[in-house]
Amino acid sequence: MKLKNINPEELELMSYTDITYMMLKETKKTMNTPTLFKEICSMLDLSESTYEDKIGDYYTSLTMDKRFVMLDNNEWDIRDNHSVEIVMDEDEEDEVEEETTEEEIIEEEEVSDDTLYDDESDLDADDDEPLPLLDEDEEELDIED
């Protein structure tokens, strides 16, 4: 169905993005955000203040809608009219993520537990005793660099 064949009441029930989709599909031309929204405001007989108030939300809705793509010239088109080209750097192609087995993970955990204390002398029996608390009367020592 063409936009000009839709009566104003039905058009008012449609979302701005649906109207945009139909407009871009029918005209087969790309358009920038202000031009698209001006056309919609004209079709719906919306005021200039409504245009100014809603243009930001309209732009956001276009960016969120997967049916549309913004081109390099800041104009919108339907995604169906464009193919997606994936470009990879040579470095990315060479990098292959290696899978780690469960055994390797367990070995890494055991090593990291063993390296917590480099020297057995770090583990004294005195470590189990609580640290003495300072009395309120005792002053803290100032440590200078």
Image (cartoon, rainbow, N blue to C red):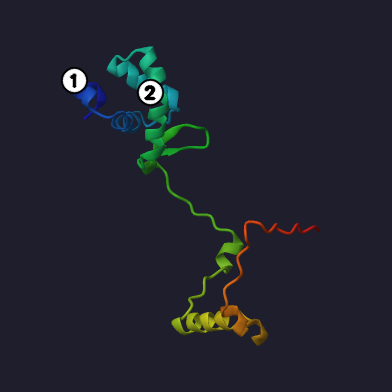
Question: Residue placed farthest to the right in the image?
Answer: 145
Q: Amino acid at mark 2?
A: Lys
Q: In this picture, is 22 found above or below 131?
A: above
Side of 145 relative to 12 (left or right): right
Report the side of 110 relative to 142 (left or right).
Answer: left
Q: Amino acid at mark 1?
A: Glu
Q: Is residue 68 above or below residue 14?
A: below
Q: Residue at x 36, y 17 (%)?
A: 50
* Relative to 142, 81 lies left or right: left
Q: Which comes before the other along the chain, label 1 or label 2?
A: 1
Q: Secondary structure at mark 1?
A: helix
Task: Establish if 62 lies above or below 92.
Answer: above
Residue 9 shows which numbered tag? 1
Residue 53 x/y as whole percent: 39, 20
Q: Which residue is mark 2?
A: 54
At horizontal 43% and vertical 28% (from top left) the residue drawn is 31
